[in-house]
């Protein structure tokens, strides 16, 4: 794999860095962008046609090469700006529609995903069917030209804000568990849907429980055929798990951590050899993960989902994120104890509010990264079976 940049790639990097620099002043790249800045960023991405940088050009994406995608993510990560907009619409259901959707489904949904006007959530996990997703029980009974859905979903991120849900349902209980699963698109405004908030350990509301009671879904909102939902879901999960490597974000957090430690008054963790060693280990592991991600992107055909490499990226990316947040808390010391809950003002008696305002929240929510998107145990099993042949 060629690791040096071509002349064209150097020019591309300069262009995207200049684009990003319009939205972050020097010295502000570490701060979390406010709502006004994010809205301006969203408008700029749409205007440039860069909001779905991983999609194929034929579906409204950029058609960028693997290296260009990598350079874009690095530029955005260094500025604490999202490399795309639209959340799960862009990251997850968009690629599935590009790969599995009919021409009618693509025409109905892709434009609203591209402009961010339609928000999506993921209906996968259920009570009793999380890591063992194939055991899901939410039923979809065929009735003429529609399905009748009954069941429950849980840990559904942003369901309280979503317009649509992409959902795994059971249409058959015979044969292998995976063979009876069907992939449906559900309107969250249906009166048969109720959403129950789940407040996370970090005090924020992003997770939800969703109950589906006689929800009607038309046939034209089925992706693939009956019983093909598991194949569709696996493609979607590999897209998700590649994104869960968090490479660009982790690189920025590492820089923020170092800057914060230097600015600290009193105890300086960098004077502690044990702390310095842990910081160096993360740096080395992150560099290796960056190379693996770039190799994965280079080996994946345009518009296709990556393979088992996505499990490798997700597993190591999770480890790095959790170690990083542990070091942030260790560096903050007692300053990390009083952290703001949702809709509360942060404490004012902080030595370094720019970097430690939400380090405890980041640490707490990062504990769930070992489960979200497929548990670490599931990723290890996938690697053992598909890479090691065990």
Image (spheres, grey):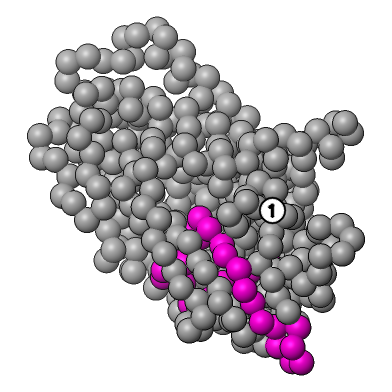
The residue sitting at 70% across, 39% down in the picture is 379
Give x and y (percent) for residue 115.
Answer: 49, 77
The span picked out in magenta is 142-168
Q: Which residue is mark 1?
A: 133
Q: Residue furthest left?
A: 349
User: Which residue shows up at 20% across the image and 35% down it?
Assistant: 338
The reply to whether residue 68 is in sight is no
Instruction: Answer above or below: position of 275 versus 208.
Output: above
- Please tell me which residue is depicted at 37% across the width and 43% down the height of the picture: 201
Rendering coords of residue 191 (x, y %): 48, 84
Residue 118 part of the magenta-drawn span: no
Residue 46, x across and y down, in percent: 47, 74
For this view, does 142 lie left or right of residue 290?
right
Determine if the magenta segment contains residue 148: yes
The residue closer to the viewer here, 56 or 347, is 347
Q: Of 1 and 120, which appears nearest the observer?
A: 120
């Amino acid at each position: 794999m060629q690791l040096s940049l071509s002349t064209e790639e150097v020019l591309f990097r300069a262009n995207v860095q200049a684009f990003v620099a319009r939205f972050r002043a020097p010295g502000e790249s570490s701060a979390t962008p406010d709502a006004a800045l994010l809205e301006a960023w969203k408008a700029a991405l749409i205007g440039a046609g860069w909001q779905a940088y991983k999609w194929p050009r034929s579906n409204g994406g950029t058609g960028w090469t693997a290296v260009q995608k990598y350079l874009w993510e690095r530029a955005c990560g260094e500025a604490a700006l999202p490399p795309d907009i639209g959340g799960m619409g862009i990251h997850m259901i968009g690629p599935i529609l590009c790969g599995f959707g009919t021409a009618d489904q693509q025409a109905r949904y892709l434009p609203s995903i591209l402009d961010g006007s339609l928000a999506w959530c993921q209906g996968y996990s259920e009570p009793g069917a999380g890591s063992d997703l194939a055991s899901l029980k939410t039923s979809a009974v065929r009735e003429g030209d529609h399905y009748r859905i009954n069941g429950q979903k849980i840990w559904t991120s942003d369901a309280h804000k979503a317009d649509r849900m992409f959902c795994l349902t059971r249409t058959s209980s015979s044969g292998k568990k995976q063979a009876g699963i069907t992939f449906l698109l559900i309107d969250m405004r249906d009166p048969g849907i109720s959403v129950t908030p789940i407040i996370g350990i970090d005090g924020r509301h992003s997770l939800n429980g969703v109950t589906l009671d006689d929800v009607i879904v038309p046939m034209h909102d089925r992706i693939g055929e009956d019983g093909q939902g598991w194949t569709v879901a696996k493609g979607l999960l590999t897209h998700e798990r590649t994104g869960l490597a968090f490479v660009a974000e982790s690189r920025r957090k590492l820089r923020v951590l170092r800057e914060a430690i230097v600015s600290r008054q009193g105890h300086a963790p960098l004077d502690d050899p044990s702390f310095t060693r842990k910081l160096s280990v993360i740096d080395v592991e992150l560099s290796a993960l960056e190379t693996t991600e770039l190799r994965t992107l280079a080996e994946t055909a345009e518009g296709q989902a990556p393979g088992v490499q996505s499990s490798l990226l997700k597993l190591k990316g999770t480890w790095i994120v959790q170690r990083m947040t542990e070091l942030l808390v260790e560096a903050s010391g007692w300053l990390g104890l009083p952290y703001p809950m949702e809709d509360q003002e942060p404490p004012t008696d902080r030595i370094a509010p720019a970097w430690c305002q939400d380090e405890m929240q980041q640490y707490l929510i990062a504990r769930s990264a070992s489960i979200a998107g497929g548990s670490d145990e599931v990723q290890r099993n996938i690697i053992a079976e598909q890479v090691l042949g065990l």
